[in-house]
Image: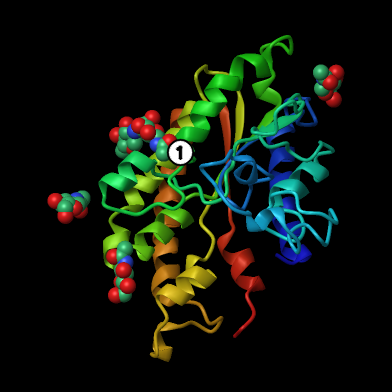
């Protein structure tokens, strides 16, 4: 992602947080708690122990990490992730991965795992889908990690620790569709799963509300899945009409927009249900599409 777009997203988030605090007095977040996939993973997947992930992991090798860190960090990019820019803009340390044992999680923790679906492994396998590697890293599993770590996170930090945390939920859905398409499902068959994916994201937001206190949650939409190299390869077509002006597959991008429209509707419902919570809907779709060069 080119910097201008990342900056745009960031500005959007920051301006929202100012609105959220204009009456409250508090001016900054003290921690970031993140859930997601490779768009947010700062090093969880590469720490997953053998023999679950045998062999070298590409994210553990150059050129990953080369343009900013100078070495691979486990991020699925050569530079920083949107989450890194958010942390830096808020004056917080880059969010450490949960599986980095011995990390200091006082200013945040990242549960995101590259390749994570919204739907869990047991469910996906029950749908006769091959999930590779078969590891429990779905949103549901990440929330279990959060519940386990929760007591130690707020210990000695007062009841308001989570009130001054920025929760970042997503992106989720891209990997679910990737698994579906790699098992030869049609776009129409994949579409049937969108409501369930949105339910899962919504349940994730709800888990963050075990008490009626104030929360700030950023919920990301889905990126343009029709531009993913894996999808472009699997669904390659000789018919030019199936591609948009960016060289991306129209049908898959339409599927992504369908999920996003369901998610936006759900966010409205959640805002009613949790009036103490600032739920910020944020967008990957258009900023990422704007970065995709015409092939
Ligand atoms: C963790 O970081 C916080 C804030 O930067 C600091 O106050 C605390 O002493 C650190 N804890 C440990 C065990 O290093
Ligand atoms: C997996 O997801 C299904 C469907 O959402 C749910 O019913 C089930 O409880 C989940 N199982 C586990 C182990 O998370
Ligand atoms: C999975 O495959 C089995 C065996 O072919 C079949 O009986 C079952 O109906 C399939 N389940 C789904 C959800 O497609
Ligand atoms: C994933 O989690 C489910 C439910 O806890 C468990 O039954 C299953 O064995 C786990 N699978 C793997 C590969 O860890
Ligand atoms: C999907 O289809 C391709 C081509 O027909 C085939 O080689 C592959 O084994 C199929 N994959 C699955 C998971 O069914």
Which quarter shows the C terminus? bottom right
Q: Is mark 1 within 8 Å of ligand 4?
A: yes
Residue 187 appearing in the image: no
Is 210 placed above or below 52 here?
above
Residue at image position (67%, 55%) is: 59
Number of other residues with Cα within 10 Å of mark 1, as a class: few under 14, some 14 to 19, many 20 or more: some
246 relative position to 4: left or right? left
Residue 44 pos. (x, y %): 63, 41
Which quarter shows the N terminus? bottom right
Residue at image position (38%, 47%) is: 197
Residue 30 pos. (x, y %): 77, 28
39 relative position to 19: left or right? left
Foreground pick, 14 / 80 = 80
188 relative position to 258: left or right? left
Which structural element holds mark 1?
A: loop
Foreground pick, 175 / 263 = 175
190 relative position to 285: left or right? left
Residue 254 appearing in the image: yes
């Amino acid at each position: 992602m080119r910097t201008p777009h990342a900056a745009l997203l960031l500005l959007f988030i920051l301006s929202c947080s100012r609105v959220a605090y204009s009456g409250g007095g508090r001016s900054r977040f003290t921690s970031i708690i993140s859930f997601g996939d490779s768009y947010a993973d700062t090093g969880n997947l590469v720490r997953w122990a053998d023999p679950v992930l045998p062999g070298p992991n590409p994210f553990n090798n150059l050129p990953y990490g080369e343009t900013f860190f100078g070495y691979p960090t486990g991020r699925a990019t050569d530079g920083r992730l949107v989450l890194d820019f958010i942390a830096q803009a808020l004056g917080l340390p880059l969010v450490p991965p949960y599986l980095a044992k011995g990390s200091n999680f006082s200013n945040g923790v990242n549960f995101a795992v590259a390749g994570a679906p919204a739907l869990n492994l047991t469910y996906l396998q029950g749908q006769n889908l091959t999930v590779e590697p078969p590891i429990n890293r779905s949103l549901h599993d990440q929330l279990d990690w959060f519940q386990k770590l929760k007591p130690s996170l707020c210990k000695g930090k007062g009841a308001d620790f989570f009130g001054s945390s920025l929760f970042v939920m997503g992106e989720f859905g891209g990997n679910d569709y990737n698994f579906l398409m790699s098992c030869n499902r049609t776009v129409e068959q994949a579409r049937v799963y969108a409501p369930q994916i949105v339910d899962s994201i919504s349940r994730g937001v709800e888990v963050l509300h075990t008490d009626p206190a104030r929360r700030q949650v950023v919920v990301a939409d889905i990126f343009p899945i029709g531009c993913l190299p894996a999808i472009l390869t699997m669904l390659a077509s000789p018919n030019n009409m199936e591609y948009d002006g960016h060289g991306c597959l129209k049908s898959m991008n339409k599927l992504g927009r369908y999920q996003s429209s369901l998610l936006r509707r759900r966010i409205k419902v959640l805002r009613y249900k949790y009036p103490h919570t600032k739920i910020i809907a944020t967008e990957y779709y258009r900023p990422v599409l704007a970065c995709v060069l015409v092939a």
